[in-house]
């Protein structure tokens, strides 16, 4: 009886830990670590899930605008490689968390929540450079 209880508790703990971390394929990454990895030459796709107006005002260079309300519909076309390293960001971190959930449910396996772009340690740019 005690063994069954211990096993049940173990599975409950594992379940809650996996849900808190976002499940399979989802990790958090700080903007500083993300920039360091980009600077080291890693192939990473930065995805901005804010609105086109917000993106035009200021965004991280070479990022892809894919607004949260279009993400589910347009992800496969704009991010065809479901194994690609994808770092999702927004202004404060709320939409990026929702974005990684959507991408993970769509089968993307290497998705990172970078959170708030206001913590980005590098340069920013203005305008609509990616044609969205």
Image (tube, rainbow, N blue to C red):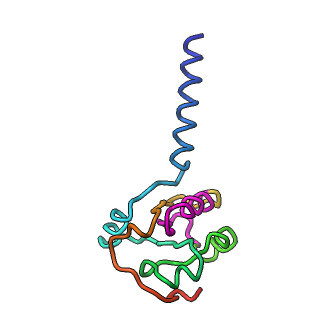
Nearest the viewer among 57 and 42 is 57
Count of labels in the image: 0
| The C terminus - image quarter | bottom right
Q: Is residue 22 above or below residue 109?
A: above
Name the residue located 57 percent from the left edge and 64 percent from the top edge. Answer: 95
- Residue 120: x and y in percent read 37, 70
For the point 50% across and 60% down, the residue is 110
Residue 90 part of the magenta-drawn span: yes
Tell which residue pokes out farthest to the top in this image: 1
x then y, percent, for residue 15: 57, 37
Examine the rendered structure and indicate whether residue 123 appears above or below residue 49.
Answer: below
Work out whether 18 lies above or below 69. Answer: above
Range of magenta residues: 80-104
Q: Position of residue 83 (x, y in %)?
A: 52, 63
Whether residue 127 appears in magenta in the rendering, the answer is: no
Left or right: residue 37 compared with residue 67? left
Q: Quadrant of residue 76?
A: bottom right
Quarter where residue 49 is shown: bottom right
Q: Residue at x 56, y 24 (%)?
A: 9
| Quarter of the figure with the N terminus | top right
**Is 29 located above or below residue 47 in the figure?**
above
Residue 5, x across and y down, in percent: 58, 17
Q: Residue furthest right?
A: 73
Horizontally, residue 31 falls left or right of residue 65, namely left
């Amino acid at each position: 009886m005690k063994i069954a209880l211990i096993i049940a508790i173990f599975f409950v703990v594992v379940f809650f830990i996996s849900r808190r971390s976002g499940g399979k394929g989802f990790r958090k990454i700080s903007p500083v670590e993300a920039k360091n990895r980009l600077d080291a030459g890693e192939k990473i796709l930065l995805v901005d899930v804010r609105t086109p107006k917000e993106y035009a005002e200021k965004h991280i260079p070479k990022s892809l605008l894919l607004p949260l309300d279009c993400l589910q519909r347009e992800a496969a076309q704009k991010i065809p490689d479901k194994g690609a390293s994808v770092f999702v960001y927004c202004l404060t971190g709320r939409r990026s968390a929702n974005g990684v959930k959507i991408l993970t449910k769509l089968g993307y396996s290497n998705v990172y929540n970078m959170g708030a772009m206001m913590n980005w340690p590098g340069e920013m740019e203005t305008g609509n450079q990616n044609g969205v």
